[in-house]
Image (cartoon, helix red, strand yellow):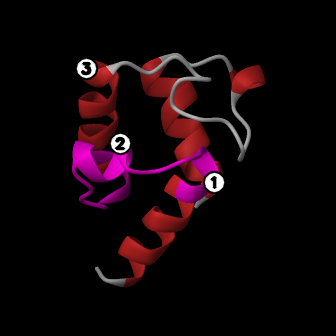
Amino acid sequence: MYEELKQVLVTNLKVDREVIRPTATLEDIELDSLAIVELSLYLESELGISISSEEIFGRTSLGDLAGLLEQQSGNV
């Protein structure tokens, strides 16, 4: 699920591929609150996984967020 998250970040939110790593935080990749809301919408539309912006804010790293996506995809 990490690769799918990475693809959404690069393609839709124009995050530099070089800064994306499992240990990166949302601050490390420079996502503000508006970008987090957009990410939530892209995840639902492209991956079919509904995760609120609050749940995304609660993650400590991209690896942690990918784990949440993996967990949620199993619940679909």
Which one is nearer the viewer's eye here, 18 or 62?
A: 62
Q: In which quadrant of the rendered view does residue 64 lie?
A: bottom right
Q: Which residue is mark 3?
A: 34
Instruction: Mark 2 or mark 3: name the one nearer the start of the chain.
Output: 3
Q: Are marks 1 and 2 in contact (CB under 8 Å)?
A: no
- Give coordinates of residue 11: x percent, y percent: 51, 26
What's the residue type where badge 1 is placed?
A: Gly
Looking at the rendered image, the quarter that the N terminus falls into is bottom right
Q: Which residue is mark 2?
A: 57
- Give coordinates of residue 41: x percent, y percent: 23, 40
Image mark for residue 27: none
Residue 48 placement, left or right of 20: left
Q: Which residue is mark 1?
A: 63
Asked if residue 50 is among those painted magenta in the image, a careful observer would answer: yes
- Give coordinates of residue 46: x percent, y percent: 35, 48
Instruction: Mark 1 or mark 2: name the one nearer the start of the chain.
Output: 2
Q: Residue at x 44, y 76 (%)?
A: 71
Residue 52 vs 13, above or below: the answer is below
Q: Residue at x 72, y 23 (%)?
A: 19
Asked if residue 9 is among those painted magenta in the image, a careful observer would answer: no
Residue 44 vs 27, above or below: the answer is below
Instruction: Mark 1 or mark 3: name the one nearer the start of the chain.
Output: 3
Which stretch is magenta? 45-64
Q: Secondary structure at mark 3?
A: helix
What's the residue type where badge 3 is placed?
A: Leu
Which one is nearer the viewer's eye here, 40 or 29?
A: 29
Q: Residue at x 45, y 65 (%)?
A: 68
Q: Residue at x 24, y 32 (%)?
A: 37
Which one is nearer the viewer's eye here, 27 or 21?
A: 27
- Distance (Cα) linking label 1 and label 2: 13 Å
What's the residue type where badge 2 is placed?
A: Phe
